Image (spheres, helix red, strand yellow):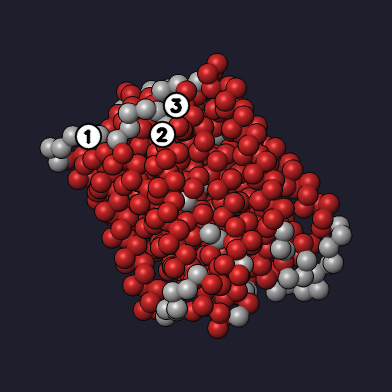
């Protein structure tokens, strides 16, 4: 990949994800105003639980698809068919797991239908959209990946508008029904697009089974990310209230939206981390350090902007979310912390240290859960903020420490690939 290609792909992802973030913000405002903090908190708690399990639905097959296709395009059909087959099979089994675990993890009284609908949406249909985007990512066609990420946001915006204007009950259950239909429509479009532009392949899980350990490491890494990003929302709903979960989740959504440009660069650069990593960890680390000053500078500026803009949030989301402005000010440093640890993590992945990355992320996820268990009953959403900041800071320090230690032992890259 040339520098020009990287810049073009970064621009496609930035543009697509900026549009996606804007659309998501619009439908989030509609949902927040329609549902209120308690019903929104119930929906968020369920989606957070599903998000922890979701990476195992595809078992890292999309990452394996990128890895092998980048190095040999003839491998695409084999690993694309394997990704689809794995997602179809595993997601249905995991739906049962989510329903069972929800009885212990979530507040009592949530409708069973709410759990099933969200699980089908995010374990099956959303994962198919993800692997379709990764298929185009493997061919450096980030315009298609950006479009596939934007598509479900647009369809969900239409669904949120229906919820807002139709004379129906404004509940988490009604919204989840619209949510699953919109995600299913988007998934069907994604599969058709891949088949038309890239082709298909045999629906066999065998390639993923052969590399189950590495695929599991990818899935475990993503699950760990979801744990330290989302377990606080689950625990707030269970240990404090669904209102507190809704308020905290609203502020966290703003932080996640602000991280969009950095995420776009990470998407655009992901395949190249594997290419540079063929020369050793020093190669992928040099690439990360090349990008970090720009993304880090942006993150520092936007963290300050979030702190200043926080008081306007209740005007957008309604009086139920008045405390969101204070939560956002506390959470604003997360944009910078996430930037720091994501680039270190991708440098490790690109050089073949996915297992190391996963171990660190799982350890931090466990620590995050323990901190929330200790802090939430005493401090409510403020305890969740402290746990998040501590976890992301520790993750950045540990990952960069490992990168520095291992890179010194890695052969120096011979050339930029």
Residue ID at (56%, 79%): 75
The local crowd at label 3, few if under 14, some if 14 to 19, many if 20 or more residues have their Cα within 10 Å, is some
Please, what secondary structure does the residue beneath circle 2 have?
helix
Pick whichever of labels 3 and 1 is earlier in the sequence.
Answer: 1
Q: Seen from this angle, which residue lies furthest top?
A: 378
Q: Which residue is mark 3?
A: 238
Disc number at residue 7? none
Is mark 2 in CB contact (under 8 Å) with mark 3? no
Of 25 and 56, the residue lying toward us: 56
As measured in the structure, the alpha-carbon distance from the residue carrying label 2 to the one carrying label 3 is: 11 Å
Of 22 and 167, the residue lying toward us: 167
Give how far across and how far down residue 47 sits, in percent: 41, 42
Displayed quadrant of residue 312: top left
Q: Is residue 51 above or below residue 325?
A: below
In this rendering, would 408 be left or right of 307?
right
Give how far across and how far down residue 71 sits, in percent: 63, 77
Disc number at residue 170? 1
Q: Which residue is mark 2?
A: 103
The local crowd at label 1, few if under 14, some if 14 to 19, many if 20 or more residues have their Cα within 10 Å, is some
Is mark 3 in CB contact (under 8 Å) with mark 1? no
Could you tell me how many numbered marks the image carries? 3
As measured in the structure, the alpha-carbon distance from the residue carrying label 3 to the one carrying label 1 is: 22 Å
As measured in the structure, the alpha-carbon distance from the residue carrying label 1 to the one carrying label 2 is: 24 Å
């Amino acid at each position: 990949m040339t520098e020009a290609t990287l810049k073009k792909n970064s621009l496609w992802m930035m543009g697509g994800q900026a549009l996606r973030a804007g659309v998501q913000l619009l439908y989030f405002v509609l949902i927040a105003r329609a549902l209120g903090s308690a019903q929104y908190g119930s929906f968020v708690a369920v989606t957070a639980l599903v998000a922890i399990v979701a990476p195992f639905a595809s078992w890292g097959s999309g990452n394996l698809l990128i890895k092998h296709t980048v190095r040999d395009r003839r491998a695409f059909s084999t690993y694309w068919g394997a990704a689809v087959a794995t997602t179809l099979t595993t997601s249905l089994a995991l739906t049962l797991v989510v329903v069972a675990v929800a009885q212990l993890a979530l507040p009592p009284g949530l409708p069973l239908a709410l759990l099933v609908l969200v699980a089908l949406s995010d374990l099956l249909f959303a994962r198919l959209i993800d692997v379709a985007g990764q298929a185009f990512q493997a061919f450096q066609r980030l315009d298609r990946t950006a479009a596939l990420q934007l598509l479900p946001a647009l369809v969900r915006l239409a669904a949120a508008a229906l919820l807002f204007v139709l004379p129906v009950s404004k509940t988490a259950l009604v919204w989840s029904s619209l949510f699953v239909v919109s995600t299913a429509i988007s998934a069907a479009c994604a599969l058709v697009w891949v088949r038309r532009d890239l082709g298909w392949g045999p629906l066999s899980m065998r390639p993923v089974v052969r590399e189950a350990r590495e695929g599991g490491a990818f899935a475990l890494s993503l699950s760990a990310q979801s744990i330290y990003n989302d377990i606080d929302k689950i625990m707030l709903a269970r240990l404090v209230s669904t209102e507190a979960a809704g308020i905290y989740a609203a502020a966290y959504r703003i932080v996640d939206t602000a991280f969009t440009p950095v995420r776009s660069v990470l998407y655009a650069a992901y395949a190249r981390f594997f290419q540079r990593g063929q020369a050793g960890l020093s190669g992928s680390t040099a690439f990360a350090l090349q990008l970090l000053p720009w993304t880090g500078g942006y993150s520092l500026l936007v963290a300050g902007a979030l702190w200043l803009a926080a008081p306007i949030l209740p005007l957008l989301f309604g009086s139920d979310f008045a405390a969101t402005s204070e939560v956002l000010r506390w959470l604003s440093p997360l944009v910078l912390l996430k930037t720091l640890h994501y680039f270190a993590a991708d440098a490790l992945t690109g050089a073949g240290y996915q297992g190391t990355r996963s171990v660190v992320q799982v350890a931090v996820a466990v620590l995050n859960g323990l901190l929330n268990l200790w802090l939430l009953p005493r401090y409510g959403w403020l305890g969740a903020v402290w746990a998040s900041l501590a976890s992301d800071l520790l993750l950045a320090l540990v990952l960069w420490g490992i990168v520095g230690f291992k890179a010194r032992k890695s052969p120096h890259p011979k050339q930029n690939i």
